[in-house]
Amino acid sequence: MSLTDAITKINETTADVIPVGVDGAIELDVRRGKRLLSTAIAAPFVTTVVPAALSIVAFLLFGGVPAASVVVIFFGLLATILGFVAGLTASGVMMYRRGKLHGTIRERIAGRGIRANEIGWFRSEVKSAEWRSLKDIERRDVMLGDAFKETLASRLTATKIAKSAQRELSKMQKRLNRLSQLKASNADELKQEIGEDIERIKKISSEAKQMLAEAESRMQMIEASAVRGTKIADAEIALKKLNARASELPLALESAQMQREIYAELDKGLDER
């Protein structure tokens, strides 16, 4: 077997083990989160049981000597208490790191576009009425429930994009105002490019708001269909349009963010001059 064939075979073997891309990064972070949770749960038990077990063994070995037994009991209790406190501290640290990691996962999911099976990551952002409607529709009709979940994912994506676009627009406006105060030879050209990016972000924000309105309207229609007992054909057609837009808008916003980072570097270079 040649070296090329061997490398190809290794890549094929490890393709299912080592994920790549945004989805791969999300999967790796999810695994890390599960390990952190397991560690946080196990830490208090391990740090308490181990010194307690050692103390019991020491007491069985030296319990025949009164003075030694008192020392063993004292230090055994002390080690057990300190171990329990240390375990709780380690557990708190692990849970804090897990919370930060989950925030990163949510940002990556939102940047890529939220999918129906990822709504649980944004449970706090789902309205209670929407959640109740989802559960009720799923109980009535599984297919309508899937359609409602897809539409809800589009609604969450549109909301995230609209908020991100608003933040980017604010940053662009501040950078444009700051650039207006500089007297650089290429300031006019930079201002024109930033102005174009501002218009592009405004368009993204407008499309996100339109997508949000469509998603909310579609959710109401699906809910009404579930109540009437009608079928899903019309909902599926509209969902394809929503999903297409939900996949395009995050990419457009990410492109605008990259442009903003480039301009930030240019501004920094102008300041240094």
Image (tube, helix red, strand yellow):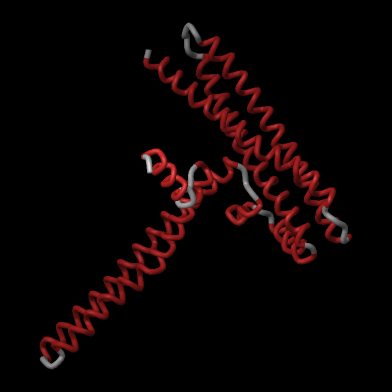
Seen in the picture, residue 218 relative to 179 is either above or below; the reply is below
Q: Where is residue 45, by image quadrant?
A: bottom left
Residue 87 x, y percent position in the rendering: 33, 67
Residue 10 visible: yes
The residue nearer to you, when weighing 148 against 160, is: 148
The residue nearer to you, when weighing 88 against 27, is: 27
Q: Tell me what residue is drawn at x 15 percent, y 90 percent.
A: 63
Q: Tell me what residue is drawn at x 25 percent, y 76 percent.
A: 51
Seen in the picture, residue 167 relative to 46 is either above or below; the reply is above
Q: Tell me what residue is drawn at x 32 percent, y 72 percent.
A: 46
Q: Tell me what residue is drawn at x 63 percent, y 28 percent.
A: 201
Q: Residue furthest front?
A: 1
Lateral position of residue 264 relative to residue 59, left or right? right
The residue nearer to you, when weighing 181 against 74, is: 74
Residue 101 visible: no
Residue 24 x, y percent position in the rendering: 50, 47
Q: How many marks do you count on the picture?
A: 0
Q: Residue furthest top?
A: 185
Q: Quadrant of the C terminus?
A: top left
Lateral position of residue 159 relative to residue 223, left or right? left
Seen in the picture, residue 84 relative to 262 is either above or below; the reply is below
Seen in the picture, residue 121 relative to 258 is either above or below; the reply is below
Residue 241 x, y percent position in the rendering: 76, 40
Q: Quadrant of the N terminus?
A: top left
Residue 215 x, y percent position in the rendering: 75, 45
